[in-house]
Image (cartoon, rainbow, N blue to C red):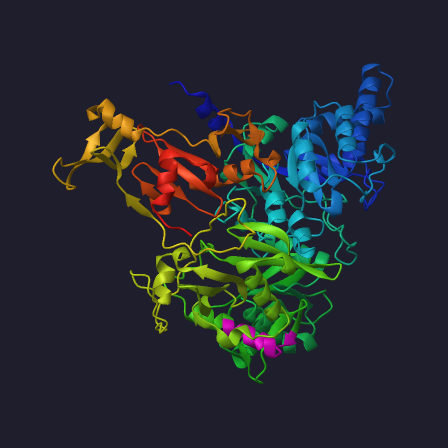
Amino acid sequence: MTFSDEQVSAISERWMRLDLHIHTPASEDYAEPEVSYLDILRAAAAHQLDIIAFTDHNTIRGYEQFRDELALLERFVQADRCTPEERERYGEYQQLLAQLTVLPGFEFTSHYGSHILALFSPKTPLSVLEAVLLQLGIPAQELKAGSCSISNTKHVTEAYEIIHRAGGIVIAAHVNAHAGVVSESIRFGNSGQSRVAATQSPYLHALEFVHFYASHESYLSPNFYNGQHTYYERPMFCIQGSDAHRISRADADNPESKKVYGVGDRYFEALLPEASFDALKALFNSKQIDKVRVPRRDQKQWEIDNVRLNGDSRHLIARPATEEYLAQAWHDIAALANADGGVLLIGTDGEQNVSPTVISEQIKQLVAQHLDPQPSLSLELMQYQERDVVRIEVKTEELPPYVASNGSVYVRRDDQTHVANREELLQLARRALVRSTMSPLDNGEDLELPRSGVEIVSEQKRNAVWTYEVRDLRTTTGVERDRAQGLWAYAIARHEELRDAKIDLNEDVRWYGRLGVWRTFQQGNRTKYDLIHRDASGVIDHIFYGVSEWGLGEGWRSLLGINDNFGVDLNVNDDHAPISVPRGFTAPLDDAQTDGEDDWMPWGDRKYRWKGRGGLWRIYGNDEKIRFDLAMKNKEDEDFQTFNDVTRAKLTEAWLNLIRVKPPTTGIEVVAMEESDFGRSFRFRNLRSGEVSDPWRDQDLEQGTVREYAARMFLEDLPIDEAAVRWWGNIGYMRPMRSQVDLVYRDEDGVDHIYYAARREELENEWRELLELWDDE
């Protein structure tokens, strides 16, 4: 029997352990400066690691010293000029390196402080790695310092590309913790676009998480980056590393701040054919995310490390088994239940005269006595550094709030347990209301945006002037109220009234599960809506202003009582099921900030296109079976006969002349899109000159330009949604604005051509006639 190369590779693959985030004494904040590089390798071998990486702060000094020591020992041994101790040391090095692959790298501190891991092949000259550090903005005098923070370095996305182009593996370090790209974007209030760029860059290979299974927040959880969320369509490899600043885990009685973990205390596993840089990079360049996993077997130990390192959190509490605490432990359990669950750790120090069994029984009795309803408890005895720990996992099966026998409701606030205040009680009630009114149509899937209207995404006050990030069919930043017009001005005005507490949103909204109708109003002869969405916790997370009827999907139309004739019945029955918001829509270029109006009639239409007596209704099918629906007028009158499902072979030259339409002489067409290791690139045809451009990388397309718009919309438009086009035979248009329009042409082979940003005033012949058939003003 013979095997293919792929089968042979699969047979030879095995799960390997990797810790790609290890510091050495070359980092200025290393906890044990007396540690040797041999000590680090011994610890890695003790944890059965296969691949490790030295990643000191902004330097390769640690890896350089390791290599120099090894080379010096080798010269002494080969020249027979070594001591017995040196020979033994060299032999141990050789033994360890036979089972361990050590990669050179560094942990780069980018502009604004986010950290990035850069890993390279051991074959890479160290001078090349220092050149990369210089290119990233590390001053020459700092190359050996191992400094934790250096000013005026490259921004995150620039650094990704520089490291990638130098042949490195690029990993965003501890993204959900201090100095991680996600945590920093949330802390500084950066736009969602910044977070998308920092986690979806084509130059980025993986995201490193701390406390891998502990996070309950969307952006801070590895599960969020599975490719199923809008704007985060690229599935990411999610890993963890020790970020070791010492050899072994710090003693429980003396945990040094931020330096708890040792080599291999946190690792991940990868299915690889060999323990090499090339094999690892090939995996990260693939889409086989199932070949990377983070084992759960050590997570409960890491959970205790987490609370020792960072203190209590909303979902994780650690307490001593004192008599005083045990009498009130049910307060924390109630608060965790009202936070949708969590873990309570009760530890003994050997001096308390109480057994874990007694603790468990006492906790269960107190919860049964004091809480209504009772959360589900899973109790487990653990050993942590030779001490007993009772781990109590709190799970919720009933809707909140969980009320105490004394009438109080306990919640987690500022990582502490408190009696709920009025606002927190309202929040719990909203969350319960949302969950109690769920229906099959409101299935909790990712929110999709309406196809019309605008949303205020964020706000910032600069020099006493408020500026806004506005999503109108596309996202635009830096909008000031005085410069906004039309629907944008309306949205900003309503937003400011809410912010300044001039209006009470909760008094006016009619809720249907997680969706709400805030306001219905007339603009001209058209009805518009301000619509609300709230998350699973009952918190309002989206407000859409001025949504037109045409922008509503079937579910929204049903919710609002809009009939097939597009009339509106405002007496919507409360039993109407809520529905997910329809998918987003992106604006053409020049009219996004003119008046913001979306007053188009309900979209999608089709008409015959005639030439003489012949008419074309549509072209449809696939490459193997293209079909044409045709018509022929009678000689005597205007009646006509239809001929449907006609094959390409039956068309005469006269019919082909009807079908063929010359491109307009205005606009731009995407003629090719290519994917490579360097990302995505596009080729464009300038319809005015007919010239085809060289490839443009998507990161080189400046936002707001015609090319960037065409590339972005090209990714959304294909395959063509028939209902999004007004067809005149085989040509059509979509997204019309006052001065420009996007045109569509389906040729005789069934291939769709989209001509973006065509200027209305320059259109001629069939294209001008096409727009004259509908009144879009």
Camera sees residue 239: no
Q: Is residue 173 above or below residue 50?
A: below
Q: Is residue 163 above or below residue 319?
A: above
Rendered residue at 75%/44% (across/down): 111
Rendered residue at 84%/42% (across/down): 33
Rendered residue at 68%/68% (across/down): 414
Rendered residue at 37%/50% (across/down): 775
Image spot of residue 263 (x, y percent) = 71, 42
Camera sees residue 140: yes
The furthest residue to the bottom: 406
Instruction: Residue 352: name its quadrant.
Output: bottom right
Give the side of residue 722 with respect to residue 132, left or right. left
Q: Is residue 711 above or below residue 467?
A: above
Q: Is residue 420 magenta?
A: yes
Image spot of residue 300 (x, y percent) = 60, 55
* 221, 321: nearer the viewer: 221
Image spot of residue 625 (x, y percent) = 25, 30
Q: What stretch is highlighted in magenta?
A: 418-430
The furthest residue to the top: 79
